[in-house]
């Protein structure tokens, strides 16, 4: 009688032995990776597999180390953005300025006067810091900060219009990132949506025809993530403000000031973006906007406007659920001070957006010289974050024609570099790459392209 061959699964190492050969993550995560590698080996082992226990151990450990590396890459960490998308939602949106980081570190590593009046020795308000400064920068009476723009819209509608009617143009019932739709946010706030006009044309008379005692607000929504052209008409805030009910503007992105006094000259691609200061001057009673997409600061939502309406927002029970923490407020306060002091051009977002093409071309020349096979190309960057749709920013990058561009950009991602594929070539757009990362980018490209060290 022939003895059956031994079960090859018996030669697989135990999880503990595999863990002993791993490092780079906390022990519980190493155990997860080791167990996954052992389970995979058990499920895929074949009868003719090498029965040598040492060989089996080496194979399982190699698999586990790959899983550890993959898990480490999945942890939140810094990457190089070579996509040409300035406010890249998937890559963390706007880079935080050093001044904001320093402010955050200061308050995060100790105590702060977050809700305390030092002069009086009494309880204060967390809205007295960043919110008040941003209101000043916008020319508004008051302001508060919450954790994102959708929360700002939800809070403002709930505080001012719950149980009443809000009139909005059909052409402004937009969907923002992540599948959030304005009508759904309005429904969650408890107000009743009254649609007026048509998709492409809404006149002041359309709003006026629907005015009733139940009207709480006239709402305008900035179509930040799409552009409508052709036979269109929208009612400006100045006309709506004359109708009586408060006008609320959800600006989302846009500009703090449409004149961009922090730049030598406003870039052409910003020509149609609304300015919060101008919207307030035109008569808006409440304006909501983004702390990152509009200001170049941390992700946050800002509400500015009439003092009584902002106070109603701050006093609403929902305000506590969506309030910003001390770290976000410290960063946004630092960003607000940069605008108030006329130094906003130093913010990373504006440095990238306003970088001269000639400067980018010089960097591209150096990168192409450092990585064989690269050619300098004119590119088109975008603002990103669902803002200035359809408009691009002249930029410069370096392109490499390779047999498999998708494989190459995957190799770059393993070096924490995110590039793009364009017409079959790997393209790195330098408008969104910090100059301090140029050498890191070159090293990653040389490895991904198999070019070896410089």
Image (cartoon, rainbow, N blue to C red):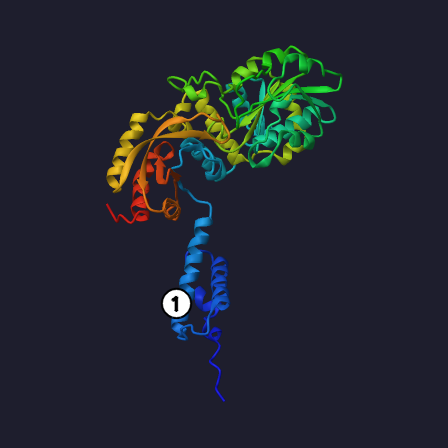
- Which residue is drawn at the image coordinates 26% and 48% (left, top)? 451
Residue 144, horizontal then vertical, whole percent: 58, 26
Judged from the image, the secondary structure of the residue bearing numbered disc 1 is: helix
- Residue 47 position, x and y percent, is 46, 74
Quarter of the image for the C terminus: give it: top left
Q: Is residue 120 left or right of residue 407?
A: right
Front one among 208 and 400: 400
Q: Is residue 118 left or right of residue 243?
A: left
Extreme-bottom residue of the structure: 1
Task: Say how many tags the image has.
Answer: 1
**Image-quadrant location for residue 355:** top left
Q: Is residue 440 placed above or below 309 in the rendered structure?
A: below
Q: Is residue 397 visible?
A: yes
> Can see residue 121?
no
Residue name at image x 31 percent, y 40 percent: 400
Relative placement, left or right, of 36 versus 200 is left
The x, y position of residue 93, in whole percent, is: 47, 35
Say which residue label 1 marks: 58
Front one among 190 and 199: 199
Which residue lies at the image location 64% right of the left edge and 26% below the top edge? 156
Image coords of residue 237 (percent x, y): 59, 14
**Label 1 crowd bin: few (<14), some (14–19), many (20+), radius 10 Å:** some
Given the current orientation, which residue lies at the most extreme right position? 213
Q: Nearer the viewer, residue 427 or 367?
A: 427
């Amino acid at each position: 009688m022939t003895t059956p061959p031994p079960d090859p699964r018996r030669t697989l190492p135990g999880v503990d032995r595999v863990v002993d050969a791993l490092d780079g993550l906390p022990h519980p995560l190493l155990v997860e990776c080791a167990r996954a590698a052992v389970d995979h080996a058990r499920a895929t082992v074949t009868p003719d597999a090498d029965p040598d226990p040492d060989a089996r151990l080496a194979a399982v450990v190699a698999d586990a180390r790959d899983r550890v590396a993959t898990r480490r890459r999945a942890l939140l960490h810094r990457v190089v953005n070579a996509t040409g998308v300035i406010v890249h939602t998937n890559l963390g949106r706007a880079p935080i300025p050093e001044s904001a980081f320093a402010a955050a570190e200061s308050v995060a590593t100790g105590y702060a006067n977050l809700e305390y009046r030092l002069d009086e020795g009494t309880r204060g308000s967390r809205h007295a810091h960043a919110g008040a400064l941003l209101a000043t920068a916008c020319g508004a009476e008051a302001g508060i900060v919450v954790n994102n723009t959708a929360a700002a819209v939800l809070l403002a509608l709930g505080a001012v219009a719950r149980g009443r009617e809000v009139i909005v143009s059909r052409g402004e019932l937009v969907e923002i990132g992540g599948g959030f739709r304005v009508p759904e946010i309005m429904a969650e706030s408890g107000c009743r949506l009254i649609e007026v006009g048509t998709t492409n044309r809404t006149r002041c008379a359309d709003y006026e025809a629907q005015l009733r005692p139940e009207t709480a607000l006239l709402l305008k929504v900035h179509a930040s993530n799409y552009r409508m052209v052709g036979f269109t008409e929208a009612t400006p805030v100045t006309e709506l403000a004359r109708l009586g009910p408060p006008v609320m503007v959800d600006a989302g992105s846009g500009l703090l000031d449409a004149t961009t006094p922090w730049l030598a000259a406003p870039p052409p691609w910003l020509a149609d973006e609304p300015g919060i200061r101008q919207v307030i001057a035109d008569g808006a009673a409440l304006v909501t906007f983004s702390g990152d997409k509009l200001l170049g600061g941390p992700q946050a939502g800002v509400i500015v406007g009439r003092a009584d309406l902002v106070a109603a927002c701050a006093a609403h029970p929902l305000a506590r659920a969506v309030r910003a923490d001390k770290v976000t407020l410290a960063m946004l306060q630092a960003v607000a001070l940069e605008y108030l002091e006329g130094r906003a051009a130093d913010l990373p977002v504006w440095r990238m957006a306003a970088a001269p093409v000639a400067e980018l071309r010089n960097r591209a020349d150096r990168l192409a010289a450092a990585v064989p096979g690269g050619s300098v190309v004119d590119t088109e960057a975008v603002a990103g974050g669902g803002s200035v749709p359809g408009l691009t920013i002249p930029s410069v990058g370096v392109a490499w024609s390779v047999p498999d561009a998708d494989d190459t950009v995957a190799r770059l991602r393993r070096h924490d570099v995110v590039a793009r594929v364009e017409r079959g070539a790997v393209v790195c757009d330098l408008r969104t790459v910090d100059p301090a990362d140029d050498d890191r980018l070159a090293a990653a490209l040389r490895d991904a392209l198999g070019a070896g060290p410089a």
